[in-house]
Image (tube, grey):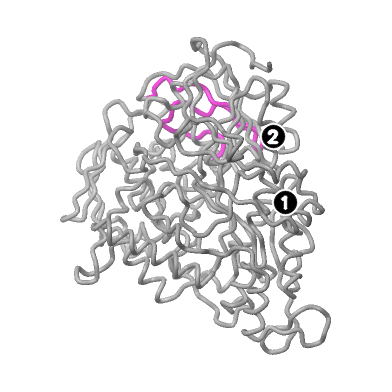
Amino acid sequence: MNKRKLGLLTGSAALALILAACGGGSDEGTESSANGNDGAASEGTEESGVVEFETAVTNEGEAMDGGTLNVALVTSSPFQGLFSLELYEDGYDADLMQFAIEEIFSTDENFQITNDGAVSLDFNQEAKTATLTVNEGVTWSDGEPMTSEDLLYSYEVIGSPDYTGIRYDSTMTNIVGMEEYNSGEADTISGITVNDDKSITIQYLEVHPGMLQSGGGIWAGAMPKHQLENIAIKDLESSDEIRKNPIGFGPFAVSNVVPGESVEFVANEHYYKGVPKLDKVVVEVVPPESIVAALQNGEYDIALSMPTNEYPTFADLPGYTILGRQELAYTYIGFKLGEWDAENSEVVPNPDAKMSSKELRQAMGYAIDNNAVATQFYNGLRSNANSAIAPVFEDFWAEDVEGYSYDPDKAAQLLDDAGFEDVDGDGFREDQNGEELVINFASMAGGDTAEPIAEYYMQSWKQVGLNVKLTDGRLLEFNSFYDRVEADDEAIDIYQAAWGTGTDPNPEGLYGRNSAFNYTRWATDENDAFLDNISGRTSDDEGDAWDKEWLTEQYREWQAYFSEEAPIIPTLFRNEVLPVNDRVANYDWGYDADPSFGWHAVGVTQDEAITE
């Protein structure tokens, strides 16, 4: 995989001062930037001011037998604790599940499905089928072998009318018979055939090359039917079997959960890749304000979801190596443009929504300087995002799409031309009908930078005459924020959030008409057509998604169209960092890591963390 290095730009001096006044850090942050690549190990250079990271630890010493790995999950909020690929909703639960609840497929450095994992894939383009076969020795952590019924049960849960999760989407309705099953017209999914006790075949309405990507259309979960089948599907989300005693087939098994606070894992002696080197992994929630001191004291070996705004305080932490890589994520400003029709599982745009003016949305994008935000608040570990496709997807990222860079004069001109004028002379623009325009902005609490960044955005919009106020007059707690955004709360006109894109660049899961994750509730015929092309739902004379050159062009044209329509303003591409104690051995964080370097291979070289 080619390693793309992102050049991170510094913001304007004037806005850097505004940001500093908001509490965004010292002037030292404006002198350098940092970039974590996705696999290369290299050294930073003073000439470029760019810090680059390794993605693997090669610490001295042989891993001991056993031991406990102490892991911090850095967040201001309790985790939800939905230990199920079918039911979880946020990245913190994903961080926790990685030790015990694996996906069934392995992938290569390009996130393409390989057959080295728990399940092998035989994909037949002509027949529009995928045959999934459980590989030899794959066993649940309670000792029960994984079967074809476990593969099928995952689909039966997601497709059930009683399903409470968020993964019944276009990838599911693409399965023959799934919609009839979901509506209650059929008791089984006609398009899924159980071949034997280890294999199922899935018949699709349409197939496309993205389905060979992890997360690209073939579901990557399995559920232990022997544990869950007697629990009503509507009750799974609240059950102890999901929240306290989940069963997985990963290298570790959940042994104790303190809801919202900590999870203890023990080695899974049945793990199909071999018994892990470690005896235990203990993960505890640690507030961002406390994590650096905790690492200095050697309380944790690894810190997940480490806040990049704190990077200068731990960059040279004795006893730790700082790993880094491009993150499969971006932050954005979203505009509420409609509602979600749960009964029909589709977005219903509202042409009269407060933020329906494309020019208003574009102006809000040009009014903010995200390079200054990246420099001042994130020490250059983030950069202005030009697209809703992350650069790590090199083949499909449209580098030439300009996106929204700081241009307040252009923002003001767009508003003037669109009829947003200050009618009463109070310094704020009225809407196109001359009525008061107050834009309610939802932003999450968490860490030292949440409030100053929100304040900066509101100041920037005020400078072009827009009256933007925090929803409820305050920052919202993480879980409450997403509950309200998902529910299309009328008190939210715009919101600041982030998407983890997963390993599939196809944007349909986030911006498709039938995606519950399309929180902006924006949909157009043109967008539908682009997503049809990307997802292979086209006739031969329109184009062939199996033609890589044609597919790449569709991705890039979509990015240009999406940027122009501006249902969101992508704000920052992210680089994530991971402090790893020098007693940790055999850990590789790179996207191109050898499959043998999973959590089962990680060990520790001594009993206590190294702090010097």
Q: Amino acid at mark 1?
A: Ala
Q: Amino acid at mark 2?
A: Val
Q: Which element carries disc 2, helix, strand or loop?
A: strand
Tell whether 176 sits left or right of 530.
left
Quarter of the image with the C terminus is: top right
Which residue lies at the image location 73% right of the left edge and 45% below the top edge? 447
| Residue 293 percent location from the top left of the image | 75, 28
Q: Which residues are magenta?
A: 243-271
Quadrant assignment, res 298: top right
Other-residue count near label 1 (Cα within 10 Å), few / some / many at <14 / 14–19 / ≥20:
some
Which residue sits furthest bottom? Answer: 433
Quadrant assignment, res 570: bottom right
- Mark 1 near mark 2, Cβ–Cβ under 8 Å? no
Does residue 610 show up magenta in the picture?
no
**How many discs mark residues in the rendered view?**
2
Residue 95 lies, with reference to residue 17, above or below; the image says above
Of 322 and 518, nearer the camera is 322
* Real-space Cα separation, disc 1 to disc 2, in angstroms: 17 Å
- Disc 1 target residue: 450
Residue 286 circle label: 2
| Residue 308 percent location from the top left of the image | 64, 41
